[in-house]
Image: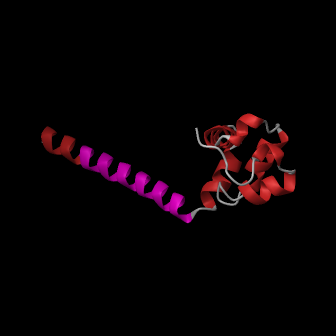
Amino acid sequence: MTSFQTKTPSEMAHNDFIATFGGIYEHSEWIASRVWESGITAADNEVANLQSRMKETFMSASDEEKLGVILAHPDLLAEQQYVVNSLSRRRRSRRVRVLISVH
């Protein structure tokens, strides 16, 4: 596993932790804050462990909070719109094929 080389999360004060990790999820510092408030241990000095905890915190957030993160990242919003448009095009194409095959 890969450990943090310069600053170890388990030794950081709240403000240092937020300054270091608060921007990871589109500058949504509340994620890093919740992780820190839930308790940072030596296990969180491993990159994968801290990454997993931050992801779990995001995934357990309210829909409104998740939407806020997505809206803060224009590329994510554009990607979501592309997926929606792509699905719509496929559905329309499927409907046209069905209509053609019926007639």
Query: Which quarter of the image is occupied by the N terminus?
Result: top right
Q: Which residues are magenta?
A: 74-95
For the point 68% across and 43% down, the residue is 54
For the point 53% across and 58% down, the residue is 76
Q: Position of residue 59 (x, y in %)?
A: 64, 39
Residue 94 shown in magenta: yes
The quadrant holding residue 43 is: top right
For the point 51% across and 63% down, the residue is 75
Q: Nearer the viewer, residue 64 or 79?
A: 79
Q: Nearer the viewer, residue 3 or 83?
A: 3
Q: Is residue 102 left or right of residue 63?
A: left
* Residue at the bottom extreme, as displayed: 74
Query: Which quarter of the image is occupied by the C terminus?
Result: top left
Above or below, 57 against 14 in this view is above
Above or below, 4 against 59 in this view is below
Q: Position of residue 89 (x, y in %)?
A: 32, 53
Residue 83 shown in magenta: yes
Q: Position of residue 58 (x, y in %)?
A: 67, 43
Q: Is residue 50 left or right of residue 10?
A: left
Is the magenta region chiefly helix, strand or loop? helix
Q: Is residue 85 left or right of residue 33?
A: left
Rendering colour mode = secondary structure
Q: Position of residue 96 (x, y in %)?
A: 22, 48
